[in-house]
Amino acid sequence: MPGRMAERICRSPGVTVDAAAQRRPPKWRLLAASAQLPTFGVDSMRRNLLAAAAALPALLICSPTLAQAPAGGPLWSQLSPQQREALAPLAGQWGGMPAENKRKWLEIADRYPQLSPEGKARLQARMSEFSQLTPEQRRTARENFQRAYQLPRESRESAVEQYRALPEEKKKELNERSRRKEAAQLVPKK
């Protein structure tokens, strides 16, 4: 169909298609011809609409970047092998992730090669844990992270050391208290 449409438009009065366009496939001739159509009168409007309707599939077929340009950031298949390696724990959720989150993860992936092997392992373990959290738990984790980094570095390090020094029973008790508090926040108030 685009081929016949292209031939018809190319033969329209006032439309010239150069020799280079004539050698191209019909869908390209259609695009070259539709750019020259006059924009007045009912017939020309109908021709323009038909040309646009016929040109759109041709553009999508011929332009893989237009056909695949996701509004939500790059597809997993569009990432470099290094980025895919760094972000491997997030592969399952990548497609449903908002563009802003993808951008932040890509910034982390760009710093990944400079990490020590222990740092790489720790980052991927944390990514894996993060990917298994519910959206509400992720929001809480982000808020906690922001709150922690508002403190001076010495205060953060001191708090981490104090937590590490706690006995395992006390750590479990604190975790349970935190879970109950989160659960209470999720329950709608009447």
Image (spheres, rainbow, N blue to C red):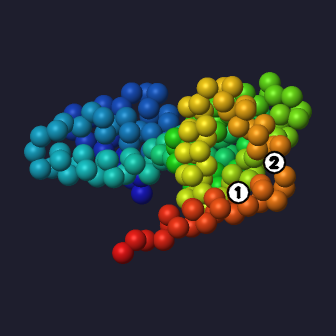
Tell me which amino acid carries mark 1: Leu
> Residue 110's spot in the image, x, y percent?
70, 29
Viewer-closest of 156 and 40? 156
Which residue is label 1 attached to? 174
Tell me which amino acid carries mark 2: Leu
Mark 2 to mark 1: distance in Å?
Answer: 10 Å
> Residue 7's spot in the image, x, y percent?
37, 46
Q: Are marks 2 and 1 in contact (CB under 8 Å)?
A: yes
Left or right placement of residue 51 versus residue 126 in this view? left
**What label does residue 31 carry, if any?**
none
Viewer-closest of 83 and 55? 83
Q: Residue furthest bottom?
A: 190
Quadrant of the drawing holding the N terminus: bottom left
Location of residue 100 with respect to 182 vertically, above or below? above
Q: Residues within 10 Å of mark 1 (few under 14, many from 20)?
A: few
Which residue is label 2 attached to? 166
Please identify the quarter of the rendering in which residue 83 is found.
top right
Judged from the image, the secondary structure of the residue bearing numbered disc 1 is helix
